[in-house]
Amino acid sequence: MQSTTHYELDKEGYIVDPDDWNEEVAGVLAEAEGLELNDKYWPILNFMREYWVEHKVIPDVRHVIKHLSEHHGYNKKEAKQVIFTLFPYGYVKQACKIAGMQRPRGWSTG
């Protein structure tokens, strides 16, 4: 089956228009990062997308940690560990990219 999803990436592999993102795109972006998405990733990715839709800004990692702590049964230390285990090359480099965010210009890629 051929994909009907159309999206453009910048030179660093971040999506140009976050509105072009969907779960299929997330899978392609994750694969490019050497990751295979499973049920552990979706609470993070879905929260990031919901936050972006509501605020039109990328959630800082502390917002994701707070979300995981309040809604998914982790304490803050565990939530931080989950994020950095799932995205070993960093929140901005991998989580933001896979969630269909544009590259944050004020943050490092770590």
Image: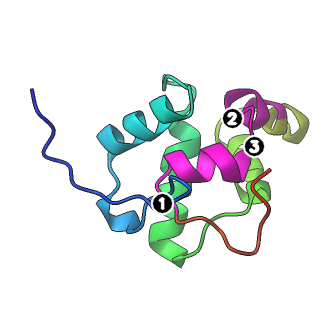
Q: Which residue sits at x=47%, y=62%?
A: 10
Q: Position of residue 71 (x, y in %)?
A: 65, 42
Residue visible at 61% across and 45% down in the picture: 95
- Locate the N terminus and report the quarter of the image it occupies: top left
Q: Which mark is residue 50?
A: 1
Disc 1 is placed on an element classified as helix
The amino acid sitting under disc 3 is Gly
Q: Residue drawn at (40%, 65%), measured in percent from left and top?
A: 18
Instruction: Name the spot of residue 40 as percent of width and height, x first.
Output: 57, 26
Please say if the residues under marks 1 and 3 sit with CB atoms less than 8 Å apart: no
Q: Residue at x 11, y 33 (%)?
A: 2
> Is disc 2 placed on a helix, strand or loop?
loop
- Is 42 part of what is drawn in magenta? no
Q: Amino acid at mark 2?
A: Phe
Q: Is residue 73 above or below residue 17?
A: above
Horizontally, is 25 left or right of 4 in the view? Answer: right
In this rendering, position of residue 43 left or right of residue 88: left
On the image, numbered disc 2 is attached to which residue?
87
Q: Residues within 10 Å of mark 3 (few under 14, many from 20)?
A: some
Segment colored magenta: 81-101
| Element on which disc 3 rests | loop
Residue 90 is tagged as: 3
Asked if residue 93 is positioned above or below residue 36 in the image, the reply reads: below
What amino acid type should be assigned to the residue bearing mark 1? Answer: Glu
Residue 72, located in which quarter of the rendered image? top right
CB within 8 Å, label 2 to label 3? yes
